[in-house]
Image: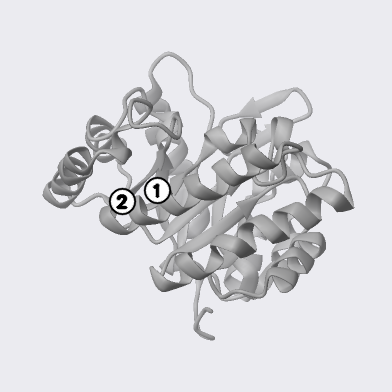
Amino acid sequence: MYPEDASSDEMRLAAMETILPTKAPDSINDSLDAGFEGLELNVAGPDPADDPIWSPSNRNRIRCRSAELGIEIPSICLGYLNGGGVTHDDPDVRADARASILRAIDASAALGADTILVPFFGDMMIESDREKDRLVAGIGAVATAAEAADITLALENTLSGEENVDLCERIDSPAVGVYYDVGNAIVYGIDAVDDIYALEEHLARVHFKDYTEDGSRMIGEGDVDFPACVEALADVGYDDWIVLETTSGEDQVADAAENRERSAKYLD
């Protein structure tokens, strides 16, 4: 998946839309003001009234603004699936989630985004073999469409790197990978460096945030060993986006800019 000579200076920084005060297209301006090169859109819900990405005219405005300002849209996050995804007990909810991912594939292609974050947190946290089986079946059912659109479905969850490798191997699609969050590793007591090496070619995208046992912190003020994580990412040949999902206070753009600057120092 990655060239053998990849190094950390090839990684670029993007903001997750949730760390900014606005929605696209205005969040693109905020990303530029905070010094980012890219913006990961956070989709608020599956219906046209929930989010601008579901409207072709709004998608066109987003693409025009991103082209005008030079801010790429590398990915979108389907955060609402934490309330009802492909591992849900209700088969109708699972079917709706699959249909929603298929619509998101079309929207991502129209936006020029090559990755869709499919999360499994909250109500959709994976805690049993039955839920793993449902994930494999549900994501497997939409993987062919993602592959045809040249889009990666990136799974983010609370499982270890080895467990995620097993899921990816069971799904067996080049369009499915893992979205790894080095801050979440602290929350769930997982070794991020070990996970990065375990995931290797299954690593689709990376979130940066920092944590202590007391909660979220600005980059560099928590327990994440960013130098070791960056070294591991370089070792496995990761040369893609680092997306910040960081904490902020009253001035979200200023705090995003500070977290971006701190993160950039680890990539030098």
Say which amino acid is labelled 1: Ala
Q: Counting residues from the N terminus, which is met first, the one under dot 1 or under dot 2?
A: 1
- Dot 2: what SS? loop
Q: Which disc, if any, is residue 37?
A: 2
Q: Position of residue 223 (x, y in %)?
A: 72, 39
Q: Which residue is mark 1?
A: 14
In the image, farthest residue toward the front? 92
Res 61 → quadrant: top left
In the image, farthest residue toward the top? 250
- Left/right placement of residue 182 relative to residue 253 reads right
Residue 211 seen anywhere in this rendered image of the structure: yes
> CB of mark 1 within 8 Å of CB of mark 2?
yes
Q: Residue at (60%, 46%) from the top-left corner?
A: 95
Q: Is 134 placed above or below 260 here?
A: below
- Left/right placement of residue 103 relative to residue 60 reads right
Q: Position of residue 57 (x, y in %)?
A: 16, 40
Residue 239 seen anywhere in this rendered image of the structure: no
Q: Is 103 placed above or below 169 here?
A: above
Say which amino acid is labelled 2: Glu
Q: Position of residue 4 (x, y in %)?
A: 54, 86
Q: Residues within 10 Å of mark 1 (few under 14, many from 20)?
A: many
Q: Is 86 placed above or below 195 here?
A: above
- Left/right placement of residue 96 relative to residue 136 reads left
Res 124 → quadrant: top right
Q: Residue at (71%, 31%) from the top-left corner?
A: 122
Q: Between 232 and 134, which is closer to the camera in this rendering? A: 134
